[in-house]
Image: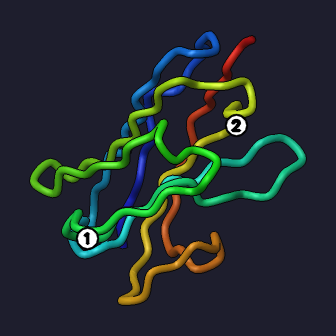
């Protein structure tokens, strides 16, 4: 089992940047595929970025492609999401999640462990 704690959210103006962090503890963080999800009010939780255990492969949703970068530091048990050129539609609760599977998933139901979320609010 792994415990996840997000940080780095906040209020930012449109066009600004934020860097989200996710600290992991517990079982070997380096064995998990990690994802960043977000959930806006009234909407489903969606995967916006995913990184494999080694960092060799990443996935980005079309809605954020070119504006966000996912990375990890397995030595520090940390996951990051650098977000640039933020838009009001990026406003949501952002979660990091761990997938204990050899397969790559995009659905929230397939992820095994979740943090509590960090709020990102982008003003226009």
Query: What label does residue 92 carry, if any?
Result: 2
| Mark 1 and mark 2: Cα distance apart in space | 26 Å
Name which residue lies at 24% across and 75% down. 31
Say which quadrant the N terminus sits in: bottom left
Mark 2 neighbour class, 10 Å CA radius: few under 14, some 14 to 19, many 20 or more: many
**Relative to 26, 44 lies left or right:** right
- Which residue, as the protein is rendered here, is positioned at the far bottom? 102
Instruction: Find numbered disc 2 in the image and state the secondary structure of the residue it sits on.
Output: strand
Query: What label does residue 53 carry, if any?
Result: 1
* Foreground pick, 123 / 25: 123
Q: Position of residue 85 (x, y in %)?
A: 53, 24
Figure check: 66 above or below 74: above
Say which quadrant the C terminus sits in: top right
Instruction: Find numbered disc 1 in the image and state the secondary structure of the residue it sits on.
Output: loop
Name which residue lies at 44% across and 75% down. 99
Name which residue lies at 52% across and 47% down. 65
Name which residue lies at 67% across and 23% down. 121
Q: Quadrant of residue 24?
A: bottom left
Figure check: 18 above or below 95: above
Query: What label does residue 13 carry, if any?
Result: none
């Amino acid at each position: 089992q792994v415990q996840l704690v997000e940080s780095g959210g906040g209020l930012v103006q449109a066009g600004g940047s934020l860097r989200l962090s996710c600290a992991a503890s517990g079982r070997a963080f380096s064995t998990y595929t990690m994802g960043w999800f977000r959930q806006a009010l009234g909407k489903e939780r969606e995967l916006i970025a995913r990184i494999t255990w080694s960092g060799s492969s990443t996935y980005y949703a079309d809605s954020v492609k070119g504006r966000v970068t996912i990375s990890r530091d397995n030595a520090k048990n940390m996951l990051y999401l650098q977000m640039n050129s933020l838009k009001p539609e990026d406003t949501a609760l952002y979660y990091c999640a761990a997938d204990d599977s050899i397969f790559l998933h995009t659905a929230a139901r397939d992820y095994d462990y979740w943090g509590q979320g960090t709020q990102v609010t982008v003003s226009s």
